[in-house]
Amino acid sequence: MTTGHLDPRRVVVCVPARDEAERLPRLIDALASQDWPEPFPVVVALNNTTDASREVMDGLTARLRGRLAVHVDETVFPPELAHAGSARRRAMDLGLAMLGNDDGVLVTTDADACPPPHWVSANVAAIERGVDLVGGALVLDEAEPVSTLVRARWAALAAYWAEVRRIEDDFDPRPWDPPPRHGDNTGGSLAVTAAAYRAAGGVPLRPTGEDWAFVMAAQAAGARLSHPPDVWVRVSPRTAGRASGGMAAAMAQLGDPTSHALRAPSFDLWRERALWRRGLRSRVGGDALVATLEPELPPMPCDLRLEAPSPTEAAA
């Protein structure tokens, strides 16, 4: 898949939100402060909301008219569909409808995120370099309190994943995703061409992990994924969120003082996985084959204990 030049009218930011009246103003103000040369559409898809999110968004829409073209959608999903997959799919499908054809980019984030001023332009620039899908790095929001234990464990995980990426780059390099690169491709910051979104079949209706499942489906359909270091977003370290099994749950686990160790698959296992991918990629259609088959593999055993301070050491 390849894309041509993209103008400001062909970019839509898509945000699912549920009961985020307190956090939406900071996100919308950050989007209004983007260095993109013209106002761009922002779809905020409110779902199953019981707070004042609609009233807050109406006020923001009026205040920022001329700087952002905000479109607010409100829906109530039945209980069996009231989850992250339905919410993000609704937001991105609405954005896709606004584009009207394959010539454009959908950029999605979460309602509690705060992107830097170059976020939209950096995503589009990455796509204009020849990829179809762009993941953004997750950075803990410095405006919110974070415990010493969480920061230490976050750093330990960052060091671990940096080594995993080094292994992948050594044994299974992808020319469109060169180092230096980060490794995040979550709903907190994800950009995709309209053509690649359609080819993937949209966001899967999964209660958890809808972003990962979408990224794999897009790659299985031929999309090229990159992780440029200049694409990043601030994410909230809060421990009570809206999505089951989402970022807030991960932060709660990192901050749990009863947890004394972080465990992950060993680097030897990642070397084996990189070699397995490389072997498949030698076949015709190998990149798509990897993305199709890898989700079917059993989980790797978490046999490596990461070096991170204990709760007592972190509090000292």
Image (cartoon, grey):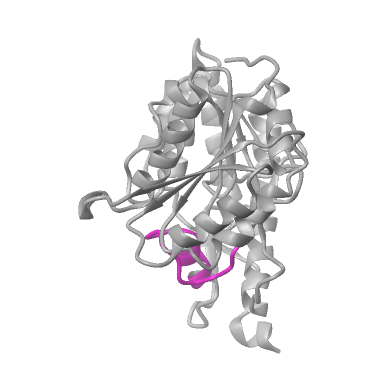
The answer to which image quadrant residue 40 occupies is: top right
Instruction: Indicate whether residue 245 is drawn in magenta.
Output: yes
Q: Is residue 81 left or right of residue 172?
A: left
Q: Main secondary structure of the magenta part?
A: loop
Q: Is residue 235 visible?
A: no
Q: Residue 304 at what x, y percent from top left?
A: 55, 60
The answer to which image quadrant residue 235 occupies is: bottom right
Highlighted magenta segment, given as a residue range: 236-252
Q: Residue at x 48, y 33 (%)?
A: 95
**In this view, 38 is above or below 16:** above
Q: Quadrant of the N terminus?
A: top right
**In this view, 181 is above or below 82:** above
Q: In the image shown, does 306 or 92 lie closer to the viewer?
A: 92
Q: Is residue 258 left or right of residue 233?
A: left
Q: Is residue 198 left or right of residue 77?
A: right
Q: Is residue 78 visible?
A: yes
Q: Is residue 25 left or right of residue 86?
A: right
Instruction: Indicate whether residue 187 is drawn in magenta.
Output: no
Q: Residue at x 60, y 49 (%)?
A: 267
Q: In the image shown, does 23 or 265 lie closer to the viewer?
A: 23
Q: Residue 19 at what x, y percent from top left?
A: 42, 64
Q: Residue 238 at what x, y percent from top left?
A: 54, 70
**In this view, 298 is above or below 310:** above
Q: Residue furthest top?
A: 284
Q: In the image shown, does 118 or 229 lie closer to the viewer?
A: 118
Q: Residue at x 57, y 40 (%)?
A: 190
Q: Quadrant of the C terminus?
A: bottom right
